[in-house]
Amino acid sequence: MTDIETLIKENRTNHYKLLTIVGNNKSRIDRLVAHLKSKDWTVYDVEENVLKITEDMPADKIRLRIGSELKKWIKNVEDRIVLVNSNILYSEEMDKIGPFSAFKYSMRGDKEGILFMEAKLRGDVAIYSTPDRPDYNERELSDVLFIELDNVEVPEV
């Protein structure tokens, strides 16, 4: 098990400062998020923000604009953010951009992010859904610090 604070310190030395925690244990995620909030990290529900961003956008333009609109949004948030509930980005309507691709490049310089990615980890590849489904996605994570959710020590809040 690795302590979340150790992971955050290690993440600061990376070019892309998007600590990616991969797993599906909701209660464990909730406990980690509560800890991060207590350390002054700002938490964003990605689905909620994507729906706000796209509400006035014509449906046929969402796939074309979602990437650039997410970059604009992230540019204007705090420097230390936690991103949760991002599965909407795997959908066909969002051009299957996926949360990792949507946020990796924005986490440079002073920006630090922690992405909770609901997927399974196989080596350095995060796998979302199953191959027979339209939202299936595989993403290599080698550019960032990543860890399986079950291997992150959850501090008491």
Image (cartoon, helix red, strand yellow):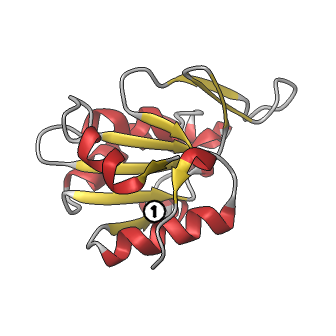
Judge from the rendering whether residue 87 lies leftward or rightward of residue 102; answer left or right.
right
Label 1 crowd (10 A; few <14 / some 14-19 / many >=20): few
In this view, 38 is above or below 74: below
| Residue positioned 47% across, 25% down in the render | 141
Amino acid type at image mark 1:
Asp
Judge from the rendering whether residue 123 lies leftward or rightward of residue 37; answer left or right.
right
Q: Give the quarter of the image for residue 126.
A: top right
Judge from the rendering whether residue 71 lies leftward or rightward of residue 119; answer left or right.
left
Q: Can residue 30 be seen by looking at this rendering?
A: yes
In this view, 54 is above or below 30: above
Looking at the image, which is closer to me, 35 or 59? 35
Residue 19: x %, y % from top left = 38, 42
Looking at the image, which is closer to me, 49 or 35? 35
Q: Can residue 65 be seen by looking at this rendering?
A: no
Q: Name the residue under label 1.
A: 56
Q: Residue furthest right?
A: 132
| Residue positioned 29% across, 44% down in the render | 71
